[in-house]
Structure formats: C-alpha cells, structure tokens
Image (spheres, rainbow, N blue to C red):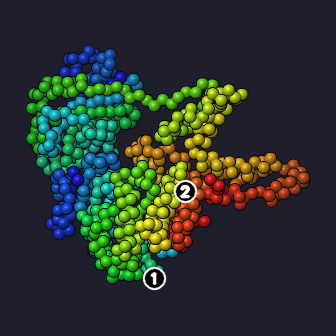
C-alpha cells in the first residue's frame, strides 16, 4: 500500500474528493485511508512532517512506499509556473546552515529540491539556496529522511507555484489551491506505480540453510547473476539432493560448490593447503589457519598423554610444512 | 559542460580565472565567498556528475603539500603530493573519489605560486643526496583538463630550476597537447595508468580506450619526456596472464619497457566507504561478484594468496619484457 502525503489540506483536496478516503482515528488528525492508499496531511515544515510521517510509518507496516505531492518554488528561471517535476535529491537548509545528509529517490532525471527552514522572502536567501538545488520547498527532505529511516521508497512530485524571488505568494497559492490539487491529482493518475518485484533467491528443496548460510547463499546468488551464470549451470542440485546427507549438509555442499565455481582461484588455494595439512591432521595435529590467510601465524595443537605422544608430536612438528604453507599464503601456487 | 561555475570573489578578476572561464562552457556563473561555503556542504550523489556537474574556482587553503601515504612511490625517497584540483572528469567504478569529497563537482585551484612556495620549502628541508618526489593527481587527473587549467608550464619552469626534486604527473588521459609544447625535463615524469582493454571498457568509464592511451604514451616518449607506468588497480580476470602479456606487448610497441622510469603495481582495494559507494553506484559491476575480504588494515581486497600471486605474476611479466627489477615496485603492499 502507498502513503500519499501533502503539507496542506488544500493540496490534497482533489485526492480526498475523487478517491474514497475515510478519516482514521489516529493519534492526530489528518490521516485517511482508502482501499488502496493512506493519505496524510503533514502540515508545513520539516519538523511537523518528520513527526507525523514517522508516527504513521511506525504504525502501519503495510505501507511500502511514500508519495509526496505538493507545491514548491523555483530558484531558476528555466522552470515555469504550473509545471510538475519529480524530485531527484533533496537537501535541507537549517537555521544554522546546510545539513550534510541528502536523500535521493530513484528518479534519475528528476530535479533537486532544497527544503528551507523558513519561507523564501529575500532575493539573497533565494540565491544562497539556489547554490544547492533549483527548487525549494519546506518538507521534502523530511519525507526522504523518515522514509529512509523506515527503509521505504519515496517519491515526490512538486507543482511549481512561483519563482522564489522574495514575494509573499502564500495567499495566491491558497487561492489557487483547487487548481493546483486538480493538476497534482491528474499527474498522480498518470503515474504507473507498481511495486518493484523483489529479487527472491530460489528456494532449494530438501535443504536447510542456517541464517548465516542463507546470507552467504543470497550473496553468492547475486554474484552468479552478475557473472551471467545460472545456479543449475554450476551446481548439480539433483545430484546433491540424491546424496545421503542431512538437509543442513546438503546446504553446506551447495554453498561449497557455488564458491568453487565462482572463485576457482580460491578453490586451488584451498586444495593446495588441504594437500599440505591433511597428512598432518592424520598424525593427530589440530591446525588452525588465520582468517583469509592474512597472517603468517598457524595455530598447531595436539593432545599429549605420555612420553610416546610427546615424542610423536616432536617428530610431527619437525616435519610440519610451515614454509610450504606460508608460501601458499604468499601466492606461490600453481594456478 | 558545466551546469554552474562557482568562482571565489577574490579571484573573479584574475587573469588565470578569466582564461579558464573563457575555455569552458557553463550555464551560470555564481560568485561565492569561499569554495567551502558550497562545495561539500551537502552530500551530492556521485553519479550526478553525469548530468549536473559544477565547477568551482578558487584558492587552495590549508596544507598545500602533503606527505604521501606509505608505499606511494619508489622506495627510500620522500614522497609528497600537492593539491591543485579536486575530482575528475572520468568515472572509474573503483575510484576512491566516489567516497572522498561527497560531491563529484570539479574544483580547480589557481594559486600555483603558493603551492610552489610550499614545494620549495620541502625541497630545502630535504637532506643532500635525497630526492624528494612531488606527485600531482592524487585527487584529480593531472592532464585531463591541462588545456583549460594551464598550469603545466608553471610547474615545468619551477622544476627546471629545482633539478634535485622530481615531479610526477599521473594520468589516464590522452590530453597531451599542452605537455608536448614543453621541453622535456629529466626530473619530470608523466605516468600513465593502464589496464587491459577489457578492464578499461568494463571499469574505467569515460576514459580513453587503450589504443589511444598507447598512442599518447608513444608521443610523449618520442618527444623525450620521461614516462612511468601504473598498473593499478589490477583486477583479476579469467585470462589474467595472457591479458597482461598482451598489454605489455602493445605497450612495448609504444615505448620500450626498459625505458620506463618505473612500473608500479597495485591490486584493486577499497576503503569500506568507497566500497559502499561502488555498491550503490554500480550495483551490477563485476567488481561486486569478486570474493573480497576485509584486510587487517580495514581495506576491502582480494584474499592474501591471490593478491600476492597477482603481484608476483605481474612482476614476472614485467621483467620478462625487459623491465629493470629495481624499477618495478609494489604499491600499498609489502614486498617479499
């Protein structure tokens, strides 16, 4: 479900009239719901918008994305009054200066907008704001900030109501509210919002992945896609499924085969280390290598119960292929 | 080319500023007090450089010459870099500038005399018999905009009078017109960053193709300029060895490998912040299909056996092509 937000009721007039919204009994006034959408009147300014939007997104997890509609001023002459533009990146101007954080929609050909801490009533102020974005409003940064906090997509469509050149135009905007709202509503009808299809990694029957294995599996699936491969091309799932292994063991086997196919170099490194270490393990030594072989140190341990064990350990340590293992760490391998 | 040109008030009427502004196109000129009042004040998404690139002109303040990081250049010499620009016109997917300034806008500083005064101080502080190196291009490409910025003759004049110091100009560009106008100096090296053509096409977006870069190298070498080579960042590919042997064969046709002043080798690496930017900016990049780990220094890179194998193999290839053993150095990695 989408949440439509407006700073002022006037901007939302057409939406409330044309769509079957009903007021919701919530912590504050201004929240409506229809079968397909929520609608929120946030009030003007970053603080009011942040507070109300956060409360609504916190309360209604079914909201998947936030669509903001409203008016803005233009800081450049190239935009005409009455045009509607999607917003790309939003910035915030605070009393103390510019806020570093910015938020972006995924509309790359949109226009940037700076949310100002006060109405633009002087040319110098408009000029200062124009250094950062060509459009100015009072809310959109808050929409981006709160949506980002709740990990929701957000979009914003701004009707250019005036050129922010120092004149108080609020009254005029208020007189034109119905016309502006109709234009925004028509724009909304022409938008084609379909929820993005999430990349769902394929489930594999007969396996059980632990949480960390699942994370690794998803990451490897992504890498397979980037490399233009397919899972079934590199792993024989039927063969693994037929093996007398537990679901957890099957998952581990699949991950191992995926890694081997994706990173053949590492597979060769692992094999060469295995060939060096396995004979030592057979002699009762426990061997622990540093993570990703970043350190030269190798932890070797063994249980000693008597003099014979001790003598065997000393003998095994003398034969321990330390240099050969360290050479593999340093890339001296046959590839 | 530029959306807006922001110029610091103090230099608005300087000859150098006017010369730069005459050579570029921009939609609007904005006078500002200081670059830092606008540049970097907000986080501007990196890829907006494709559509909304601004230019800033001003004076570099603060530290003008900085000590280079460890293993920056040839061993044993002190290395410094100086800053006369921020950001680059190219778009390499691995570039650390993605996460550095939080803005892709170009900044050009014009107070070269002040930078040179600082360089002179460093030279004077250097003990006899030691060669201090000064690198341009840490935060920008040294040649890409040299026809606009016009600073090359100023630096050449200075280093002509300071033969005990060396200057390195790092580039991926083929914009050598201004360089070719200048008389070569023994202590000025133009170093080109190269990768196999497949890598250039895949990762070095908007940079000139290998063929054109090789032509530029040949022209610079034939004019008598000293040439260095950076094989950095090296990105592993399936046919790695052949790919680099082909590259060296082609390079050897442009300049005899033994004539290179040095060859630096470095395997691709990222800070955590830059890697985050790569994921954000290039979600389908083959870089994201690599098996990187977080190293002991916090950098994201290949596992150690692979890094060392790559460096050893590439060093071997360079030596096979006649490079002098002492002139091949490994960048940002211990040499064993």
Q: Tag 2, which secondary structure?
A: helix
Give how far across and how far down residue B42 sits, in percent: 30, 49
Circle 2 crowding by C-alpha within 10 Å: few under 14, some 14–19, many from 20:
some
Determine which quarter of the picture holds residue B157. Answer: bottom left
Residue B13 visible in the displayed image: yes
Q: Chain of mark 2?
A: B
Q: Residue B127's mark?
A: 1
- Taking depth in this image into account, of A135 and B189 the one nearest to the observer is B189
Q: Residue at x 38, y 82 (%)?
A: B163
- Residue at 27 percent of width and 31 percent of height: A68
Q: From the image, which quarter does the N terminus of chain A lie in?
A: top left
- Residue B335: x %, y % from top left: 57, 65
Q: Position of residue A229 (x, y in %)?
A: 51, 37
Quadrant of residue A196 within the rendered picture: top left
10 Å neighbourhood of mark 1: few (<14), some, or many (≥20)?
Answer: few
Looking at the rendered image, the disc whose residue lies closer to the viewer, 1 or 2, is 2
Image height of B171 relative to A134, above or below: below
- Residue drawn at x 56%, y 42% as measured from the top left: A262
Q: Residue at x 63, y 39 (%)?
A: A256
């Amino acid at each position: 479900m989408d949440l439509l937000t407006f700073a002022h009721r006037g901007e939302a007039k057409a939406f409330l009239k044309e769509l079957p919204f009903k007021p919701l009994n919530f912590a504050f006034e201004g929240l409506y719901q229809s079968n397909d959408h929520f609608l929120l009147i946030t009030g003007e300014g970053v603080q009011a918008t942040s507070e109300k939007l956060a409360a609504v997104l916190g309360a209604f997890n079914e909201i998947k994305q936030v669509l903001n509609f409203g008016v803005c001023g233009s800081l450049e002459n190239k935009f005409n009054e009455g045009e509607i533009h999607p917003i790309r990146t939003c910035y915030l101007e605070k009393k103390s200066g510019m806020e570093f954080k910015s938020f972006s929609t995924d509309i790359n050909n949109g226009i940037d907008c700076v949310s100002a801490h006060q109405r633009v009533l002087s040319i110098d102020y408009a000029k200062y704001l124009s250094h950062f974005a060509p459009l100015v409003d009072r809310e959109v940064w808050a929409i981006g900030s709160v949506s980002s906090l709740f990990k929701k997509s957000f979009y914003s469509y701004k009707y250019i109501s005036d050129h922010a050149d120092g004149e108080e135009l609020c009254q005029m905007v208020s007189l034109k509210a119905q016309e502006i709202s109709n234009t925004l509503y028509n724009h909304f009808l022409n938008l084609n919002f379909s929820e993005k299809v999430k990349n769902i990694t394929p489930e594999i029957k007969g396996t059980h992945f632990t949480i960390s294995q699942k994370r690794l599996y998803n990451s490897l699936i992504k890498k397979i896609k980037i490399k233009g491969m397919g899972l079934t091309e590199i792993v024989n799932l039927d063969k693994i499924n037929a093996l007398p292994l537990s679901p957890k063991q099957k998952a581990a086997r699949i991950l191992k085969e995926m890694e081997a196919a994706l990173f053949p170099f590492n597979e060769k490194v692992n094999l060469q280390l295995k060939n060096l270490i396995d004979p030592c393990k057979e002699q009762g030594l426990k061997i622990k290598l540093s993570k990703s072989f970043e350190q030269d140190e190798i932890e070797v341990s063994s249980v000693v119960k008597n003099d014979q064990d001790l003598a065997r350990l000393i003998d095994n340590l003398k034969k321990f292929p330390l240099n050969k293992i360290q050479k593999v760490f340093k890339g001296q391998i046959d590839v | 080319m530029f959306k807006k040109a922001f110029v610091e008030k103090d230099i608005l009427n300087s000859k150098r500023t006017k010369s730069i502004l005459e050579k570029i196109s921009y939609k609007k000129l904005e006078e500002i007090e200081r670059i830092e009042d606008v540049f970097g004040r907000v986080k501007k998404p990196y890829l907006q450089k494709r559509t909304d690139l601004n230019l800033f002109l001003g004076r570099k303040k603060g530290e003008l010459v900085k000590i280079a990081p460890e293993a920056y250049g040839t061993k044993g010499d002190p290395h410094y870099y100086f800053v006369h620009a921020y950001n680059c016109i190219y778009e390499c997917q691995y570039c650390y500038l993605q996460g550095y300034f939080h803005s892709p806008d170009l900044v050009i500083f014009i107070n070269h005399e002040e930078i040179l005064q600082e360089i002179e101080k460093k030279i004077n502080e250097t003990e006899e018999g030691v060669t201090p190196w000064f690198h341009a291009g840490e935060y920008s490409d040294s040649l890409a905009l040299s026809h606009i910025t016009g600073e090359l003759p100023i630096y050449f004049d200075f280093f002509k009078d300071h033969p005990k110091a060396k200057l390195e100009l790092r580039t991926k560009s083929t914009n050598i017109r201004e360089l070719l106008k200048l008389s070569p100096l023994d202590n000025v090296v133009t170093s080109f960053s190269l990768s196999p053509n497949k890598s250039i096409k895949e990762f070095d977006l908007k940079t000139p193709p290998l063929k054109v870069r090789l032509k530029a190298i040949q022209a610079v070498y034939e004019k008598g300029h000293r040439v260095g080579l950076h094989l950095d960042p090296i990105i592993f590919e399936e046919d790695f060895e052949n790919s680099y042997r082909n590259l060296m064969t082609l390079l050897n046709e442009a300049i005899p490998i033994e004539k290179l002043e040095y060859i630096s080798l470095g395997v691709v690496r990222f800070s955590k912040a830059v890697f985050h930017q790569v994921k954000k900016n290039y979600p389908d990049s083959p870089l994201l299909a690599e098996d990187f780990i977080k190293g002991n220094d916090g950098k994201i890179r290949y596992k150690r056996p692979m890094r060392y194998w790559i460096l050893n193999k590439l060093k071997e290839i360079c030596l096979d092509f006649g490079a002098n053993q002492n002139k091949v150095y490994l960048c940002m990695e211990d040499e064993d």
